[in-house]
Image (tube, grey):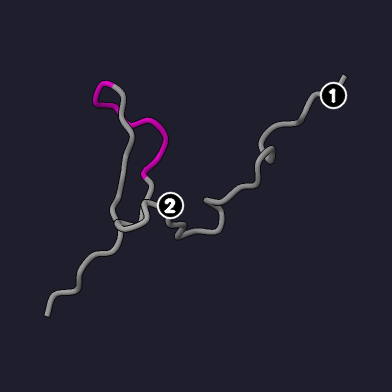
Amino acid sequence: MEKEQQYKKMLITVNGKPVGREIWIDKITYAPVFTDESAVKPAGSDAEAAVS
């Protein structure tokens, strides 16, 4: 019995060249599936907010 695959791998490209990295999405809900905890970063974790 063959198991049905629940997820689909997506890779965004521009002119045939990958941009970023591949992501996995649920085939039913199209919600992203995170396989690694480091893949989820809170907003603003990479940059300092400039406040004047």
Residue pointed to by mark 2:
32
Q: What percent of the width, then of the height, locates residue 6?
A: 28, 64
**Secondary structure, magenta segment, majority class:** loop
Please determine whether, in this image, residue 28 is positioned above or below residue 48.
below
Instruction: Report helix, strand or loop for mark 2.
Output: strand
> Is residue 20 one of those drawn in magenta?
yes
* Rendering quarter of residue 44: top right
**Placement of the N terminus among the 4 image quadrants:** bottom left
The numbered dot on residue 41 is none
Residue pointed to by mark 1:
51
Residue ID at (65%, 46%): 42
Q: What percent of the width, then of the height, locates residue 13?
A: 31, 30
Q: Amino acid at mark 2?
A: Pro
Query: Mark 2 packing: few (<14 Cα in 10 Å), some, or many (20+)?
Result: some
Q: Nearer the viewer, residue 3 or 38?
A: 3
> Is residue 44 one of those drawn in magenta?
no
Query: Mark 1 packing: few (<14 Cα in 10 Å), some, or many (20+)?
Result: few
Instruction: Report helix, strand or loop for mark 1.
Output: loop
- Rounded to the nearest whole Å, what is the CA distance between mark 1 and mark 2? 32 Å
Please determine whether, in this image, residue 40 is positioned above or below residue 13.
below
Bounds of the magenta segment: 15-22
Residue ID at (33%, 34%): 12
**Placement of the C terminus among the 4 image quadrants:** top right
Q: What percent of the width, then of the height, locates residue 3?
A: 19, 74
Lateral position of residue 45 relative to residue 16, left or right: right
Total number of numbered discs in the rendering: 2
Please determine whether, in this image, residue 14 is positioned above or below residue 10.
above
Q: Amino acid at mark 1?
A: Val
Residue ID at (80%, 24%): 50
* Mark 1 in CB contact with mark 2 (< 8 angstroms): no
For marks 1 and 2 on the same chain, the one whose residue lies earlier in the sequence: 2
Q: Nearer the viewer, residue 18 or 5?
A: 5
